[in-house]
Image (tube, helix red, strand yellow):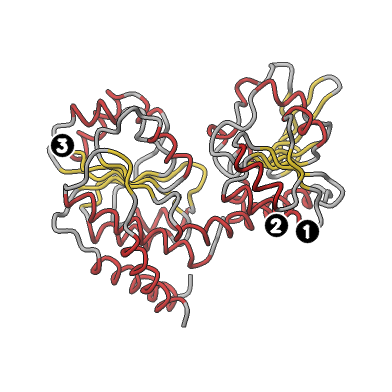
Amino acid sequence: METFERARLDAYFARIATRFAPDEQAASFVITHLLAERPAFVRAVAAMTRLTAVLPKPKSVHPGAKREVEQAHRVDTLTRDMFRDADSALDYLESRAAGETVCLLDVGGYFASSLPEVHSRFTGRIAGVIEDTENGHRRYEDLDKPPCPVITVARSPLKDPEDFLVGQSVVFSTEAVLRDRGDILHGRPALVIGFGKLGSSIARLLHAKGVQVTVYDIDPVRRTQALSQGFTVARDREAALTGAGLVLCATGAVSLRGEDFSHLRNGAYVATVTSSEDELDLSGLPDVYTRTRVGDHVTRYRTTGHYFYLANDGNAVNFLHGAGVGPFIFLVQAEILAAIRMLTRGDLAPGIHEVPASDREAIAAIWLSYFNR
């Protein structure tokens, strides 16, 4: 990032932090994709809270960004197991912020499974959680009753530009992976599993490139939306897998289980928009498949009479090329900062919440003043 761009970004976040300054400075734990532009967001979180630890998602760490953040803040290693078990989650939080008021900034629902017990046993106070993704949103919705406020930005209108551009980056990276192996998109029918904001963006962009696109979604409303936009909608997932030369998984849940992979046609490519543990049940693949690296970012799965290719080990394919979406990502990051103030006020009831429309409008106006000059 150029020096003047970094200065503009820091100025933008400083204005956001001032606009949404909390009355109380709570401790915070931040799970994040530690990409090249992310230190500016981390600095803004640190300006509004006592930033206790940054936990980068393992498959999306930019070395330079990590070094920069480590100079000022503790960076801990993140695993799903850290917060899956309540005892280990509690031990970790107590070791960093015992007795404090804590805000948990999440990407993917890491805190969800142990949250009820941690909330009841923590020596301080869990003010609440801020969740960035649709996958994480669903994990918190699946709790019978969240014990504290969970503010989600996953379905915010400020996230729409990001979702569209993430779809572009997924298509770009998928095409780059194919071209690295001498393959191309054209002539390779595509199946998009999931027709939410990301899946629909991917489907439209593939179609614009002349690719034949079929959509599969378990939600009948989304199936009607896909039909209205001119896509073929699969009634049967197995049949759709058999006909696809490229499968893009965009559900935020498990798209393909072990038994599904046998239905892939020979030579098909599989790519995802999120981590392999969320989209693919690779552990369920029969042991008869041998795994062979056949390119920088492609693994071939092969058994007698059948083979397919997996991009980026099943992790988000767009992270191979930085997953950049330009300054639009800063809209959602600002909304996360606004949510910090909401949590620290302490007046939200347990349950799922969103940032008010008035705050979103203020964020959009500030963003435009910095990035639409």
Is 241 left or right of 218, judged from the image as shown? right
Mark 1 lies on a secondary structure that is loop
* Disc 3 target residue: 98
Q: Nearer the viewer, mark 2 or mark 3?
A: 2
Mark 2 lies on a secondary structure that is helix
Label 2 – label 1 distance at C-alpha = 6 Å
In the displayed structure, 5 sits above or below 245; it is: below
Percent of width and height locating residue 78: 40, 38
Tell me the quarter of the picture where residue 137 sits: top left
Q: Which mark is residue 170?
A: none
* Disc 1 target residue: 209
Q: Residue at x 66, y 22 (%)?
A: 258
Percent of width and height locating residue 159: 47, 57
Percent of width and height locating residue 154: 44, 49
In the displayed structure, 335 sits above or below 155; it is: below
* Disc 2 target residue: 205
Q: Nearer the viewer, mark 1 or mark 3?
A: 1
Circle 3: residue type: Ala
